[in-house]
Image: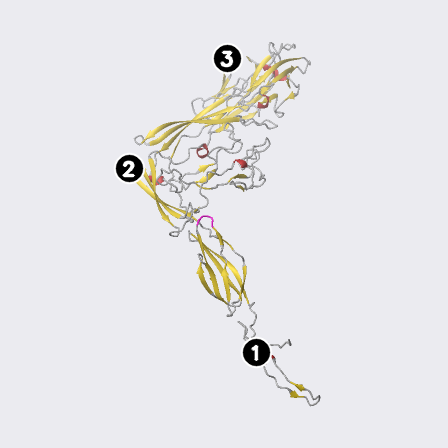
Amino acid sequence: MRSVKYGTINYSCNTGDANIFIDRSNGAGITTAYVWPGFRPRVIPVNLSYSHLTGNELTVIQTCGAPYGPGCIFPAGCTTLCYEATDASGNKATCTFDVCVNKFTGNIRELACNDEIQVSLDDSCKATIFADMILEGGPYKCYDDYIVELRDWSTNVLIDRCTNQFGAQITCSDIGREIKVTIIDPETGNKCWGKARVEDKLAPRMTCLPDTCVPCNSSIAPSALGIPSVVECLASTCSPFFSCNSYSLTYRDVSIQGNCAIGYDRKITRTWVATDNSGNSSQCVQMITVGLGHLSEVTVPSNYDGLEEDMLLCNNKIDKTKNYDAHYYKPSHLGVECLDGYILDSVLFRALVAVGADPNYYIYDPFNFGARSPRVLGWNCIDDPADKNFGHPSPDPVYYPAHPSYDPAQGFPCWGPDTHIMWYGTGRPGTDCRNLSTTYEDQIFDLATAGCDAGPIGCYKVLRQWTVLDWCTGEIGGHSQIIKVADPEGPQVLYPDTILVNMEVWTCTGRWEVAPAWIVDNCSNETHYSVEVTDGTVLGDEATGFVVTNLPLGVQDAWIVATDCCGNITRKLVRINVIDNVPPVPVCRRGTIVSLANNQSTGEGVAKLYAEDLNEGSHDNCAPHLYYKVIPM
């Protein structure tokens, strides 16, 4: 019998088969059972394991003693294990032995505890406090026979984080806490206590990204290349479930410039650092090689011609006098209301309401996940008088400045610089490669009517010729970009919808003296108009005034036709109601002789006088027939 630290092992073996024997001479505390030839030996301290011998290997089958066997912790008392092995000819060998674990003898009943210990959590962010970690002195009986009770030092609340596991557990929720650890002998009721402080000494585990090579015109941001996976705590079977994966992840880049000769643009050493709440940190390094640029990889800017992208509106040119400060809201402590949401001054805000979102808050609010953001106001313009392209659309955008409440250290609330475009640019060839240089030349094609004042912006097309030079190879490439600054809106014509027109005195036609039209335009400083009718004669011009004659009786259509300097036409419909308000012209004879006739019944003289007898050429400008009536004077 051979003694071990926490008990005694008894073993015996049936050696009736010469193929199995026990070797007891392989070292203190180790007993090995051999199966020969070709069997694997068994090492039996309390846990069983296998090691390799030379010769032909046979499968050893355990026939009794399960579930205990190699790799198991055996209970107190004796456990019988049986094994057998069969060779290819059917010859069978067996082995039976006992593993006996005897309890300690001579243990003391008094208890003495360490007054203060420090307990560090394991990889799963928990730890089990056993009796042997607190008790000192001895000899004691089997430590599993004692009860371990944990209580918060300040509140005296009982602590056991994993109710489904043996012993008393603490987790990351107890980091920094002082715990009263009480050891109780359930047999006698005797107890002692000590103080334990819980700490986390293990850094987060990181799996870094592999080294990579990217084109020079692609993004090297972590959002494009990825971030390392970080695990603060390994999976635990603790119940109830707890989570401790709280850490911060930062990175820093160190860039070394390349050149044409060594074949890359630059190399970036990206060092990631993960730090948990206890200040433990780990890091990993990713190498990013940024390649040289090639002309074939250069992306071309879009055409702003109304087909590929929208045209630039002549009334949307950048205006640096715009005041948007009044639209900034200071975030509250509950939500981040960065914008007022009203159409004031010059800033408009669009609603992008998602399911469950509050439309009164900024779209990137990290607390509320709201729905609004500042809109793009228009397009940027080259404003340097020394630039040969002065006044032309700029390729570069202008961003809203950071919100006054933005905190660079936290990254919120509201937005930081270079986040939202205020005035957009028409773009450049897509390359950030140092070996590729770009330049451009503009040709302007004026679209305004000759001699017409189209306003400070006007309407025109820009043929922008981009040239790209590869300094490493000397290759030259290029691309033509079309940009149209347009006025797609016609003038606004303010004029009555209906007009009453009277007839002329001597003709059966109306005469309309057209009052000047009130015309405004969004861009042009100069506008012109004319008059059209379905029936009639238009005389005059906009300088002297228009007169329409020969208008027939009744209702007909007329149009005020306005044009701006960019060729936009607005036709304002006017309904003309030509009415006849000219009375007939009566013409009477000055003298008419009427003869009397004798009335035989009365003996009186009578005469008849008809109205048409008095007519001397009465007439009307329109009516072909007139009606007459005689009225005594």
Which of the marked residues, 3 or 2, is nearer the chain's N terminus? 3
Distance CA(mark 3)–CA(mark 1): 165 Å
Q: Residue furthest right?
A: 602
Which marked residue is nearer to the observer: mark 1 or mark 2? 1
Q: Residues within 10 Å of mark 2 (few under 14, many from 20)?
A: few
Amino acid bearing label 3: Ala
Amino acid bearing label 2: Gly
Q: Which residues are magenta?
A: 521-525
User: Is residue 225 positioned above or below 95 on the image?
Assistant: below
The residue pinned by badge 3 equals: 28
Residue 474 tag number: 2
Task: Decide which of 134, 178 is in the foreground and name it.
Answer: 178
Can you give x and y, in whole percent of width and height, for residue 338 in the image? 55, 35
The residue pinned by badge 1 equals: 590
Task: Decide which of 74, 203 is in the foreground and name it.
Answer: 203
Which of the marked residues, 3 or 1, is nearer the chain's N terminus? 3
Amino acid bearing label 1: Arg
Q: Is residue 445 left or right of residue 334?
A: left
Q: Residues within 10 Å of mark 1 (few under 14, many from 20)?
A: few
The answer to if 612 sits in the magenta stretch is no
Mark 3: secondary structure: loop
